[in-house]
Image (tube, grey):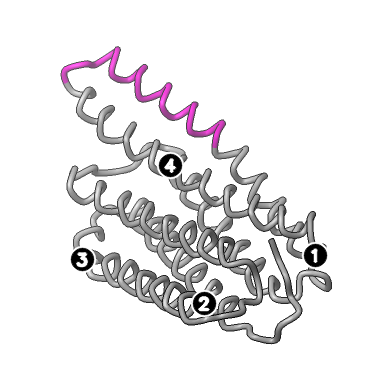
Amino acid sequence: MFNFSRKDTEFFDLFVNNAKYFHLGAVLLDEIIKDPNKALERIDEILGLEAKADEVNERIIEKLNLSFITPIDREDIYMIARELDNGVDLLQGTLQRIIMSRAGHATAKCPMLTNWIVESTNELVKAFKLLSDIKKNQREILDACAKVREYESKADMVYREEVGILYDDATRDPANRTIHLIKWKNILEDLEETQDHCNKLGNILRGGVMKYA
């Protein structure tokens, strides 16, 4: 997948840019989960992040189309660009769901989930910064990916626990808790999918290290 013989690092720089947008989106989501009253006033930031990430993705595709020789395989450039863009889209969709559903205050451990997404995306930024010299930085890249995998494992357990609590609450008080169940079950699923996506990106990086470092 990776061939680092050329000095052109622009693709790697663009990957880092979109990894940073993924992280900024995670930070924004974490802030809104902790204070949902801020959701509407932050909508422009949400849309702005997605637009900037789309611009970076288009730049990657444009450069890919114009480049005769690329520093890594063309298919892998496209895959990484797509998956980073998908991560930003997942966050944007979750934030939009919170706003549209008037979700209110989060479940008790939901901030733990968003905090782990923040930490995971931060580790991905670190890893993508190191990617252009994979032989030198293989240990650091693998360490970052291992942390993402650890956060994903923790998030799975909390996700299942929180959904179970939602159902218990709705069973005890169906008249008042059913709508809350529907809203937050969907949001928790979005968060779990986003954390899984972080791990997917980590696995892509791990695969590159295992094969080419």
Residue position for label 3 = 41
Question: Closest to the observer: 62 or 98?
Answer: 62
Residue position for label 4 = 110
The magenta region covers 156-175
Residue at 79% from the left image edge and 54% from the top image edge: 210
Residue reaching furthest to the front = 68
At mark 4, the secondary structure is: helix
Q: Nearer the viewer, mark 4 or mark 2?
A: 2
Q: Which mark is residue 138?
A: 1
Q: Which mark is residue 104?
A: none
x, y percent for residue 104: 24, 44
User: Could you tell which of marks 3 and 4 lies nearer the N-terminus?
Assistant: 3
Identify the amino acid type marked 3.
Answer: Glu
x, y percent for residue 170: 28, 18
How would you rate the neighbour count of disc 4 (Cα within 10 Å): few for under 14, some for 14-19, many for 20 or more?
Answer: many
Identify the amino acid type marked 4.
Answer: Cys
Identify the amino acid type marked 2.
Answer: Leu
At mark 3, the secondary structure is: helix
Residue at 67% from the left image edge and 58% from the top image edge: 205
x, y percent for residue 42: 25, 66
x, y percent for residue 63: 47, 80
Residue reaching furthest to the bottom = 7
Q: CA distance from mark 3 to mark 1?
A: 41 Å
Q: CA distance from mark 2 to mark 1?
A: 20 Å
Residue at 56% from the left image edge and 31% from the top image edge: 157
Q: CA distance from mark 4 to mark 2?
A: 31 Å
Residue position for label 2 = 14
